[in-house]
Image: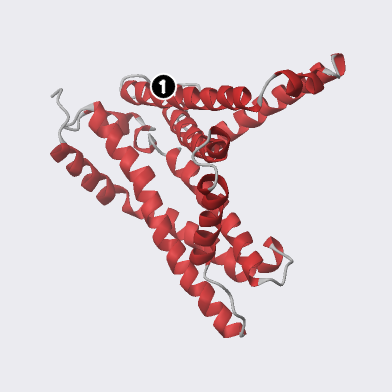
Amino acid sequence: MQSFSFQRLGLLIKRDLGQNKKGYMITLGVLFSLYMFVVWFGRGVVSSSDNPAALAASLNIFIYYITYFGLSYVCAGLCADQTTRGGRIAAGMLPATNAERFVSRFIILIFGYIFFAIILYLITDGLWLLLGWMLGKDYPSLLLNWTSLTLTFIQMNFDEGGYTFPSIVPTLYIFLSILNGIALNMFASALFNKHPFMKIILLGFIIQFIVGVVVVAFSLVSPYFWLYIPRHISYQYVALVVLGLQALSAAVFFSLSYWLFCRKQVIQYRYF
């Protein structure tokens, strides 16, 4: 069974949804609860402005971070059904290739989560408008506010000057950062047996602390080095290096995730 079959892929997705629907419903319920908590009770926290448009923009930013945090948590469940010996044996006995099993989990965790997150966002938007009506305030639609900000960003960066490299750097950086978060959490799920999401966050804090110490120490030794860089290295070269490293990092972690995913049914990571 070496060829990739879309029929088997569909059966795997159907089986996964049937077996894990309770866990998926709980995850979506928590996500929706966080959306509603921010909209209904967090208005004074996310923004002190009386401007409804500014308030809607602040709520959209918070909802984005909540959604991304939830996506990272969901991706850390790539190998959730293989944390026990019985689960690994059951996964290995499925009449499907490793590629089909990996793609089925990828589709459910990424595209399934994004699809239902959009639906919950639209429901939240409707309830947000209802809240404004109940309070007698003219709250703008969260969706229309987000659309307006997106169109403004596109017009500022692309309409006048075309698709120049500096104009697309922020968009590429955000996209690759999200992709890295997905790949890194999938790698953590394939590597760690228990609490992969918390372990990868802890590991990230440790790495950031070490990098911060090195940067501060280097600045103390050579305080004028950081002033020297902008004069002799253009923004485009720095951006190319950063984006290239991000793309390479995402590719490496996705590859390692798939490799560990395939080996997890025969190797037990005892110390993780």
Count of marks, rendered view:
1
- Residue 193 lies, with reference to residue 17, above or below; the image says above
Left or right of 177 in this view: 264? left
Give x and y (percent) for residue 256: 41, 22
Left or right of 211 in this view: 146? left
Q: Residue at x 37, y 43 (%)?
A: 109
Q: Residue at x 64, y 71 (%)?
A: 52
Q: Residue 88 sits in which quadrant?
A: top left
Give x and y (percent) for residue 67: 50, 51
Q: Residue at x 52, y 23 (%)?
A: 244
Kindly tell me whether residue 42 is visible in this rendering: no
Q: Residue 117 sits in which quadrant?
A: bottom left
Q: Residue at x 35, y 46 (%)?
A: 111
Q: Which residue is mark 1?
A: 256
Give x and y (percent) for residue 166: 58, 35
Left or right of 179 in this view: 216? right
Q: Secondary structure at mark 1?
A: helix
- The front one of 162 and 265 is 162
Kindly tell me whether residue 189 is visible in this rendering: yes
